Image (cartoon, rainbow, N blue to C red):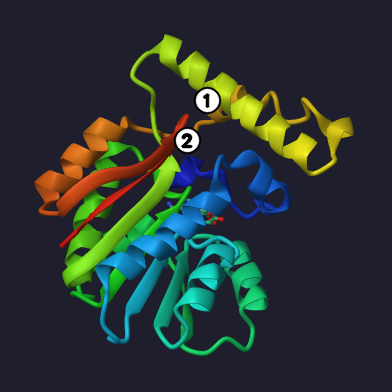
Amino acid sequence: MKNKKTNTWLSQDSTDLIDYYLSSADIIVIERKRFIKLLTNIIGYHFTGNKKLAVLDAGCGDGSIAAHVMEKYPGHSFVLMDGSPEMLTRAREKLRGAENVSFLCRSFEDFCDDSGDGAAYDVIFSSNAIHHLDFTGKSRLYEKLYSALHTGGLFLNFDVVQPSSERSEQWQFNMWRDWMNEQLAAKDRAAELGKHDGLPDLYKSKKDNHPDSLFDQLQVLEKTGFRDVDCFFKHGIFALFGGTK
Ligand SMILES: C[S@@+](CC[C@H](N)C(=O)[O-])C[C@H]1O[C@@H](n2cnc3c(N)ncnc32)[C@H](O)[C@@H]1O
């Protein structure tokens, strides 16, 4: 896991990247709103009682996804973890005054190296963050997240995954461009059509992106011990998948 040093999200000068992502996430992330709805719904299907849940958002960014989950599940306790101090500053601002929330500035790599934590969470979710780890890093993190879950706990990951061939990747990149332009058109921003068309190629060329195939990741989750492992939704390269402990 040597990619921490090449990960621009964790560098000192990540402000432009953070600003670009936060200002355009609903346009550039396919089905982001649908993912949030599915995430909150699946938590509701899995936990039917009144138990107070301990929830970890791994790679929380500015906390906007956790904020939606909190709105649906008030009274539960949330830990927001991210390796970027700047992102965590944004999350603290966004969630100022929220109860039962704590913030953890820790990279996935350091989180994996910590031996002491034990099982602490009922729900762990992550969105668009784990693909910054290579396959070894992902496998280690999945193991760590498994051990951080209570028995019966739920793990859900919404992330970009690697298509099975170059041809399929080209189709899925076109699906991504179509999605972004459809969103711009739907928001009466027709003047910006084509603005993000270069994003798929940029994403592919960036050294801090390490998408792996969905199939391989589902297999690793099963090997790690997760049950109910499945992909719950996929649109182009964006997939929602996970399992239970
Ligand atoms: C694209 S943003 C997604 C933020 C948020 N989860 C969302 O969906 O809006 C990726 C996030 O992952 C975090 N991240 C990237 N690599 C990381 C690592 N190795 N350890 C911890 N956090 C990481 C970044 O700092 C950033 O906040």
Q: Position of residue 73 (x, y in %)?
A: 44, 78
Residue under numbered circle 2: 209
Determine whether the beta carbon of the residue marked 2 sits less than 8 angstroms from the nearest atom of ligand 1. no
Question: If the image is split into quadrants, where does the N terminus sit?
Answer: top left
Asked if residue 175 can be seen in this view, the reply is yes
Quadrant of residue 120 in the image? Answer: bottom left
Q: Residue furthest right?
A: 191
The three-letter amino acid code for the residue at tag 1 is: Lys
- Mark yes or no: residue 107 visible: no
Instruction: Give 115 or 94, whichever is nearer the viewer.
Output: 94
The quarter of the picture where residue 184 lies is top right
Disc 2 is placed on an element classified as loop
Q: Is residue 87 left or right of residue 131?
A: right
Q: Position of residue 89 (x, y in %)?
A: 63, 71
Q: Nearer the viewer, residue 189 or 61?
A: 189
Q: Residues within 10 Å of mark 2 (few under 14, many from 20)?
A: many
Please tell me in which quadrant of the rendered image residue 244 appears.
bottom left
Q: Which mark is residue 46?
A: none
Q: Is residue 190 above or below residue 152?
A: above
Residue behind mark 1:
204
Residues 210 and 63: in front is 63
The x, y position of residue 135, in whole percent, is 28, 37
Ligand 1 is within 8 Å of the C-beta of the residue at disc 1: no
Residue drawn 27% across and 86% down?
51
Given residues 114 and 126, the one toward you in this image is 126
What secondary structure is found at the residue carrying circle 1?
helix
Tell me the quadrant of the picture where the C terminus can be found.
Answer: bottom left
Distance of mark 1 from mark 2, alpha carbons? 7 Å
Marks 1 and 2 in Cβ contact (< 8 Å): yes
Which residue is pictured at 38% across the width and 70% down the height?
Answer: 56
The relative height of residue 93 versus residue 21 in the rendered view (above or below) is below
